[in-house]
Image: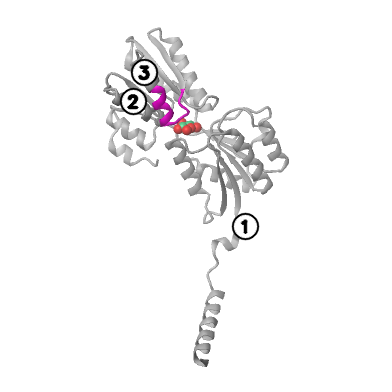
Amino acid sequence: MRKSVFAVLAALLLCLSACREAPVQESDNFDELIVVGFSQVGAESDWRAANTKSMQEAFTEANGYRLIFDDAQQKQERQINAIRSFIQQDVDYIVLAPTTELGWDTVLKEAQNAGIPVIIIDRMIEVEDESLFTCWIGSDFRREGDRAVEWLEERFGEEPVNIIHLQGNIGSSAQIGRTNGLDEGLSRNSNWNLVARDSGEFTQAKAQELMRHYIDLDFNVIYAENDNMAYGAIDVLKEEGLTPGQEVIVVSFDASRRGLVLTLAGDISFNVECNPLHGPRVSAIISRLEAGETPTKFTYVPEMTFSSETITQNIIDLRAY
Ligand code: GZL
């Protein structure tokens, strides 16, 4: 009996001395971490998944951050609640990927009054007072639309172009810019005709639903404002025995990996990149703010285009998302 008690005591002492020398865990410096509250639109698309992954990989404890992540399921009201929660938790920074352009003034004023800088990523916001956010980094959605329209003009020339237009979430700057680009194309090409226009909410399922509704119309082009809606449209074309890239030309946005695989296959004929990899970009902005510097107010990220004629598997393999 005594031996076993002694043995237990000896083991306990050994364990305690080992724990004392235990290496400092990252979480031991919990109070030194920069706390970032990130309000994300949702998980509606491949683009969004890549954007979330980029942010989560940038804002780790190993990199000196504690990330508080909120998925708003594409509802602005949930984003506003998340921002208020971040304020209550007194985070160091708020990052907002806004669902829509309008309706942010009140809650951003609350963040400003709490002395918490707000960084906007991806889509743009419209506010009375631009001091309500520190800076914005994202895409030039109107230019994305213009590039798709320029390709369609080159592809079709004077031939008839009868378009089904699958829009993203109405009021998001990605939808506004890409739609404005198409509207400019429709206004300057008398051989172009808008057959149908509807919001697929950037999702594959909603786009399938719309395409099943419009499939009997007379169209030869689908202008899908993101890859996931292009996937949905292509599903229905194939169900109906139509060959994307032949009877129907599909133009898409995002250039996600799956979108580029379909571009290589010829299902998508033209794909405009919308780069989601904002994690390192936002981390660099916060580093500058931590150093007392003032970041550029508006930063547009570089983007390229891909066509089924020029894309290769090697290009896809080299892509980061
Ligand atoms: C664009 C982004 C859009 C993508 C969609 O920057 O806001 O939202 O194009 C995503 O895939 O759902």
* Residues rendered magenta in the picture: 199-211
Q: Position of residue 210 (x, y in %)?
A: 41, 23
The reply to whether residue 145 is in sight is yes
Amino acid found under the numbered disc labelled 1: Glu
> Which picture quadrant has residue 217?
top left
The answer to whether the residues at label 1 and label 2 have Cβ atoms under 8 Å apart is: no
Q: Which residue is mark 1?
A: 32
Q: Residue furthest right?
A: 113
Pick the residue in front: 185 or 160.
160
**Which amino acid, mark 2?**
Val
158 inside magenta stretch: no
For label 3, the residue is 152
Q: Is residue 204 magenta?
A: yes
What residue appears at the point 53 percent right and 88 percent down from the top-left corner? 5
Residue 9 drawn at (x, y percent): 54, 85
Q: CA distance from mark 2 to mark 3?
A: 22 Å
Residue 96 position within the rendered picture, expressed as x and y whole percent measured from the top left: 58, 38
- In-image side of 56 versus 294 (left or right): left
Q: Please, what secondary structure does the residue beneath circle 3 have?
A: helix
Task: Indicate which disc residue 236 carries.
Answer: 2
Return the residue nearer the eye: 84 or 284: 84
Residue under the image location 45 percent in, 18 percent down: 197
Helix or strand or loop: what does disc 1 sit on? helix
Is the image coloured rainbow, by chain, by secondary structure, or in one colour?
one colour
Instruction: Determine whether, in the image, residue 192 is placed left or right of residue 300.
Output: left
Q: Is mark 1 within 8 Å of ligand 1?
A: no
Q: Nearer the viewer, mark 1 or mark 2?
A: 2
